Image (spheres, helix red, strand yellow):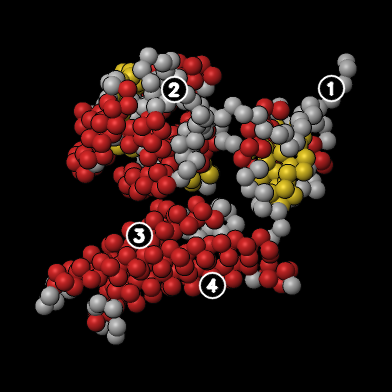
Amino acid sequence: MKEKVRRWDTVLWMLIKAILYFMIMGTFVVCLGKESHSLRSLSRTLGITIITFWVVLILFLSIYGKYDIGRRKSKPIIVSLALATFFTDIVAYIELMIMRTNEPSIYAFRLRSISWLMLSFTMQVLIIAIFVYLGNELFFMINKPERTCIVTSSQKKLDAVMRVISKYKKQYRPEAVFDYREKDLLNLIRDYQTIFVYEVPVKQRTELTKFCYQERKNIYYNPELHDIIEVNSEYYMLDDVSFLNARVKGLTMEQRIMKRGLDLILALTIGICSLPFSIAAAIAIKLDDGGPIFFKQKRATLHGRVFEVYKFRTMKQNVENKSARKGDSRITKPGQFLRKTRIDELPQLLNIIKGDMSFVGPRPEMLENVTAYTEKLPEFKYRLRVKAGLTGYAQVAGKYNTTPKDKLVMDIMYIENYSILKDIQLIFQTVGVVLKPDSTEAFDDSEKEKQLIFKPAKRENK
């Protein structure tokens, strides 16, 4: 039975997605139709509302993520779909209000319709949650965890990749680990469906990639700088010869003007709207220990220029300033809340207005970190090709304890794929970051049980 269902897997999920999205839209139309007669029958208002809803929903699904069952856990999918639905509801509602300006009691209509809008969104989230949880259950009933092996270079590297894979037990079943220096490596990995290759030299990794492609096996490997350059290269045909063209990219004058304009508009708007939160944060910090409200620290931005970044102080006075760890005693009680909600970052809006930072870009690192990271990863200096940012790809996709190398990869991906539309997309995605409990997760020193043991390849005595 499962084999038959698996054959129609693509059609099944397309049908389920279609039903989900139609139910989301239908809930909006039915609920708002309680106050708008035009949505109860075939009319121009109904047609425009449906078209608007679909176009905006598709746009926000591309920003926050789709109904990708089997690829992500249930809660992140629910949050993504809920955020996409929320913004779609708002846009469709505003468009509906514009078309209903001729309503005799327009203000009473709008007041009642807001209640129906809130009910609509509540029902939509409930529908989303049911479809996601049941969808993931169905997916993993049909698809068993993939037999997985890991190819790496040391126990430390194995622990790093296992920390991630162990969170996806329904997708992957790690059964073995191999040293990339094993002589008979290709035969050893032949029996596995999915291969994770982590921190393996490029030459051996290329051989593994070719083998997995030939044998139709899934392969995951961590990218290096040259991989990012290749991914973002353009395919060119010069006469009948194929080339990949990696152009040296930089912001054009038009992009700089648009980016600066976007920075100022957002910084001023958010600064004014968040003023009550800033005042409350300042009072809480002052009442807690009577110390200074703001924390200032020298950071690096475009071309290595040094500036002072502003934050609300979240640590006790006169303590060593280094990255916080889980349960860190240096963090004050108000600081714990400010960090969790990202309110401590609000003073950086002043840095954006001053021009030290942009709204979107690589996070500004402490000067000592820049030096230390550059010694280990010379490519780290490439982050300074653009202005430091309040948010960015590394903040949206990563966590507080994401490794410097992985953050670097994300930052370079942002730089190589820069566009104003990308900035707007990341700004919307930042809203979801606050809702993720692990996005502010600190470094954890606790030892975890080793699920696999790395065994170095045996070397022949010469």
Q: Tell me which label, 4 or 2, sits earlier in the chain.
A: 4
Q: Which residue is mark 1?
A: 459
Q: Nearer the viewer, mark 2 or mark 3?
A: 2
Seen in the image, is 202 located left or right of residue 379?
right
Which of 73/211 is in front?
73
- Residue 247, numbered circle: none
**Mark 4 vs mark 1, CA separation in Å:** 54 Å
**Mark 2 vs mark 3, CA separation in Å:** 38 Å
Q: Tell me which label, 4 or 3, sits earlier in the chain.
A: 4
Q: Residue at x 34, y 77 (%)?
A: 30
Is residue 237 visible in the rendered image? The answer is yes
Q: Is residue 152 above or below residue 128?
A: above
Q: Which residue is mark 4?
A: 15
Q: Is residue 253 above or below residue 3?
A: above
Q: Amino acid at mark 1?
A: Arg
Q: Residue at x 35, y 69 (%)?
A: 120
Q: Tell me which label, 1 or 2, sits earlier in the chain.
A: 2
Label 2 element class: loop
Q: Nearer the viewer, mark 4 or mark 1?
A: 4
Label 3 element class: helix
Seen in the image, is 79 located left or right of residue 459?
left
Which of 396/196 is in front?
396
Q: Which residue is mark 3?
A: 86
Q: Residue 215: percent from the left, percent from the top?
A: 74, 50
CB under 8 Å between discs 2 and 3: no
**Mark 1 vs mark 2, CA separation in Å:** 48 Å
Q: Is residue 307 above or below residue 272?
A: above
The quadrant in which the C terminus is found is: top right
Is residue 99 visible in the rendered image? The answer is no
Q: Residue 365: percent from the left, percent from the top?
A: 40, 24
